[in-house]
Amino acid sequence: MQSIKRWITNNLDIKILALLMALILWFYISSQYNVMVEKYYEIEITPVNLDNSLSIKEIREKVTTGIKGPQNIVENITANKISGTVDLQSVLEPGEYIIGVDILTPKSTQITKIIPESIPITVEKIVSQVYVVEYNLIGLPKKGYSLENEPEIVPKEILITASESVHKMINLVKVDIDISDISENTEREEKVTVYTKDNAVLDSLNLKPDKVAVSIYVRKGYPEEILEVKPRIIGKPAPGFYISKIEATPNSLKIFGEYTRIINIDYLETIPIDVNGVSKTLTVKVTPLLAEGIYLAENQETLVEVQIQVDEKEEEKVFEDITVKPRNASPFIDYQLTPETVQVIVTGKHSILEGLKKEDIKAFVNLGDIELETVKVELEAILGVSMVTTIPEKVVVSTKR
């Protein structure tokens, strides 16, 4: 009994201090568990249970939620520990829907608010569509060799399964084929790549198949082709003149070169011929433009004679209020013409009409036959003018009393 008493009384002050500290710590921990706090988080939303034949086109990706719980728990919660979903099990057709948001919170906490409680979702169909596989050649065969023809691709078409909006983005389905330094026939598999109109690659698509077999056939030497020669004209003839005919001699040339170069050429252009300000026929000798890797075959002309025929334009000019004068009229009768003026339209070469003035137009009516009530309007001949029209063509003749 004495030993117990000594143990209690020995270092009593230290024991009392330790007890007080334990009580303080206990009260602090209890207060942390009992104090309730609220905090807001921005969380990501995950759609679930969507039918396999449908795809989400548009969806709000995040909502804000309020979480309430003990301070020590809430302060240790991060947004990625809160699960947000929208259940699309009831969505069976394409369209626009408003779906409620479900939030799963950590243990010992509760939701106080979801902003917004429901979100709009646009759903579209997933469809399969067939696309032709194009190709892009990279590099050139070994010197002295050329492709014999276009590469063979098997299959030539693939099936792409994707949402309708993705199909609208697809512009090109292509394989890249590297033919650098090849000198013999080659067969290999190439990955298919899908591109948008902006030449961006569309990844993660369902392609069947996603690879195609490519066969490349190589020949020694270069293929030949006979192509039409097309003169390249720049500039404009002098005002009032136009190009009526262009002739090239020879009008075709034989070329040879690497197959990948020749296959994309439909004709040969000459170097530019400037016709700016020209007012007569022009004949020049020019060279054809040859792309890199394209050559002229031997034993043929290397210069092309181009004749550019320039003619003067036929133009139309209108003169208003041309006075009609009577001719061969009786001096004893006072005639009245209705109307007294006409519109005159003349057609002729630009150089003639350019200098033609209103005073040069002489309109008249022949009143030798006094019994006529309407008389055709005539015009004095105009040198260089091919056609003349008057509006009206006839005038009414009456006598003044």
Image (cartoon, helix red, strand yellow):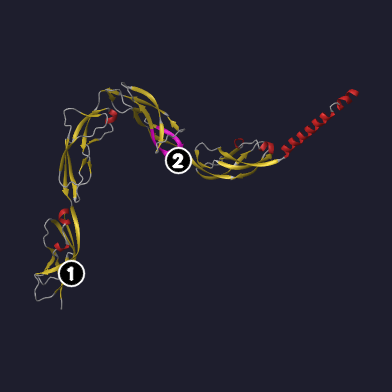
The amino acid type of the residue labelled 2 equals: Ser
Q: Is residue 221 above or below residue 266?
A: above
Which quadrant holds residue 185? top left
The residue located at (91%, 23%) in the rendering is: 2
Q: Which element is circle 2 on?
A: helix
Task: Where is residue 89? Give x, y as percent.
Answer: 56, 39
The question of residue 103 being in magenta is answered with no
Q: Amino acid at mark 1?
A: Glu
Q: Quadrant of the N terminus?
A: top right
Residue 165 lies in magenta, yes or no?
yes
Boundaries of the magenta span: 158-173
Answer left or right for 171 relative to 339. Answer: right
Q: Position of residue 165 (x, y in %)?
A: 45, 40
* Residue that mark 2 sits on: 165
Q: Nearer the viewer, residue 51 or 309?
A: 309
Q: Which mark is residue 340?
A: 1
Pointer 2 local density, CA inside 10 Å: few below 14, some 14–19, many at least 20: few
